[in-house]
Amino acid sequence: MAKAKKSKVEDLRSLDDQTLTDRIGEEEVRLKKTTFSHAVNPIENPLSIRQMRRTIARLKTEQRRRALGF
């Protein structure tokens, strides 16, 4: 499991700044749509919402890390 997380981080670090910003926007829109559709009609896998939130958090963490210069 630790290897899977490490590869996700390495994948994020390989993205350029513009792509990272674009992905954050896309994922946030996707999360909003999924959350709304879940409120109207329950989705099959509600844990996918948690995964989306965590993906957004990883992306924003990488963006902040770059802004701080690490």
Image: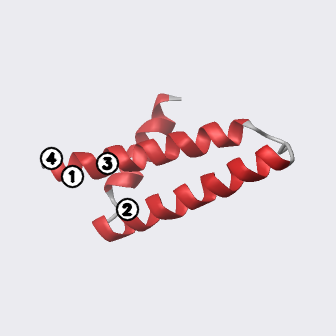
Q: Is residue 15 left or right of residue 8?
A: left
Q: Is residue 69 left or right of residue 63?
A: left
Q: Amino acid at mark 2?
A: Leu
Residues marked 3 and 2 touching at CB (< 8 Å): yes
Q: Which residue is mark 4?
A: 68
Write down the quadrant of residue 33 in the picture.
bottom right
Image coords of residue 21 (percent x, y): 37, 64
Q: Earlier in the sequence, mark 4 or mark 2?
A: 2
What kind of element bears circle 4? helix
Residues marked 1 and 2 touching at CB (< 8 Å): yes
Q: Which residue is mark 3?
A: 62
Colour pattern? secondary structure
What kind of element bears circle 1? helix
Q: Which residue is mark 2?
A: 20
* Real-space Cα separation, disc 1 to disc 2, in angstroms: 11 Å
* Real-space Cα separation, disc 4 to disc 2, in angstroms: 15 Å
Residues marked 3 and 4 touching at CB (< 8 Å): no
Residues marked 4 and 1 touching at CB (< 8 Å): yes
Q: Is residue 13 left or right of residue 38?
A: left
Crowd class of label 3 (few under 14; some 14 to 19; many from 20; radius 10 Å): some
Q: Which residue is mark 1?
A: 66
The residue most toward the left is: 69
3 up-or-down from 8: above or below: above
